[in-house]
Amino acid sequence: MNVLGIEGTAWNLSVAVVNEEEVVLLVNDPYQPKEGGIHPREASQHHAEKMPSLLKSVFERFPKEKIDGIAFSQGPGLGPCLRVVGTAARFLALKLKKPLVGVNHCLAHVEVGRWKTKAKNPVVLYVSGGNSQIIARRGNRYRVFGETLDIGIGNAIDKLARSFGLQHPGGPKIEQLAEKGSKYYQLPYVVKGMDFSFSGMVTAAQKLKEKAKLEDIAFSFQETAFAMLTEVTERALAYLGYDEVLLVGGVGVNKRLQKMLSVMCEDRGARFYTPPVELMGDNGAMIAYTGLLMLKHGYSTPLEKSFIKPNFRIEEVEIRW
Ligand code: ATP
Ligand code: FE2
């Protein structure tokens, strides 16, 4: 079975074809804001402009006739971007006369991670721009055991980077700065039960600019935020009695976060997994693969139910595999 998947919930317009074993092809055309953060309308215009050439490049390398299904990210994400993706997917499904399947973007991050690592039933730390959640499967649903009460960790890092005058996305630049920092400044460590929050930390970190070096602020920010995430992941692991941790989402490429989690896992005798870098942030392969799983297990999305779901939650999907 070959499934084509389209991702475009936010910054990355990405199309892939996968089969059960591998990613056959993956093409990206990311949106890069000229200044500031991601502007939903500009991002959607970018996606609409680039969609035809991206699909054309896919069909030049993979025959249309061999596609068995069309998967698309139905949500959560930015409304205008989701609309562009949904329209393209509906068009392709009609044109190729193949089933359409709407995929939950968060579920796709989790499933591509399980597919490409040996993790079977992990506690998942899903950290990206818009989302920060601790997810684990119980019965036939994934449940969210803890999450951010305000902004995602990626958005928090991007905001801090912007206030340093750095261009979006800020994650890699803050990571580089933090590697050169060593002096720790205390920042609000906000964990409430299993939930956490980052916006107060951003404000406090921005205020440090008057007295501290950027390297030390970036270092202090990462140490505090990643310790919060590691603490809650550990608590979920202990509570559930699971012995695997899977890190997914764009922030998951961060080496310091990976290190903290792997040390925690080692201390607890748990195994720690990260998927390959190109499948950690938003990508079409995760949508195509999750769509393939869904189609194989009897799911498909009729056109009249293929409307976008900007607030789609992972718990809403019944897992039949
Ligand atoms: P979602 O819709 O799942 O919230 P997203 O649109 O935020 O996804 P992702 O690709 O999953 O997209 O994540 C992007 C985020 O990852 C950005 O906030 C970016 O700054 C952050 N990021 C990228 N590289 C790093 C890094 N090395 N360290 C920390 N954060 C990073
Ligand atoms: Fe994402």
Image: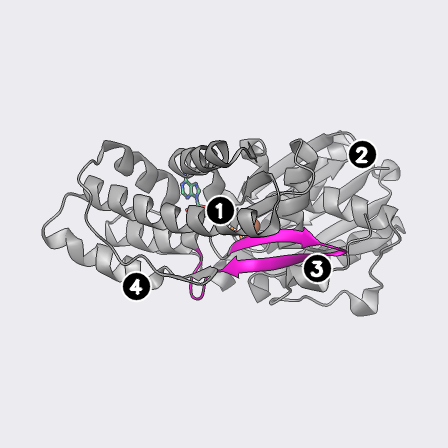
Magenta residues, as a range? 133-152
Residue placed most toward the observer, 171 or 271: 271
Which residue lies under the disc numbered 3? 86
Marks 1, 2: nearer the viewer: 1
Which residue lies under the disc numbered 2? 20
- Cβ of mark 2 under 8 Å from ligand 2: the answer is no
Q: Name the N-terminal-most of marks 3 and 4.
A: 3
The local crowd at label 2, few if under 14, some if 14 to 19, many if 20 or more residues have their Cα within 10 Å, is: few
Q: In which quarter of the view is residue 26 placed?
A: top right
Looking at the image, do the residues carrying marks 3 and 1 touch, with CB atoms under 8 Å apart?
A: no
Q: Where in the figure is residue 259, as x and y percent of width and height?
A: 42, 33
**Amino acid tagged 3:** Gly
Secondary structure state at the residue bearing disc 1? helix
Q: Name the N-terminal-most of marks 3 and 2.
A: 2
Residue placed most toward the observer, 114 or 267: 267
Q: Name the N-terminal-most of marks 1 and 4.
A: 4
Disc ID at residue 200: 4
CA gap between label 3 and label 2 equals: 24 Å
Secondary structure state at the residue bearing disc 3? helix
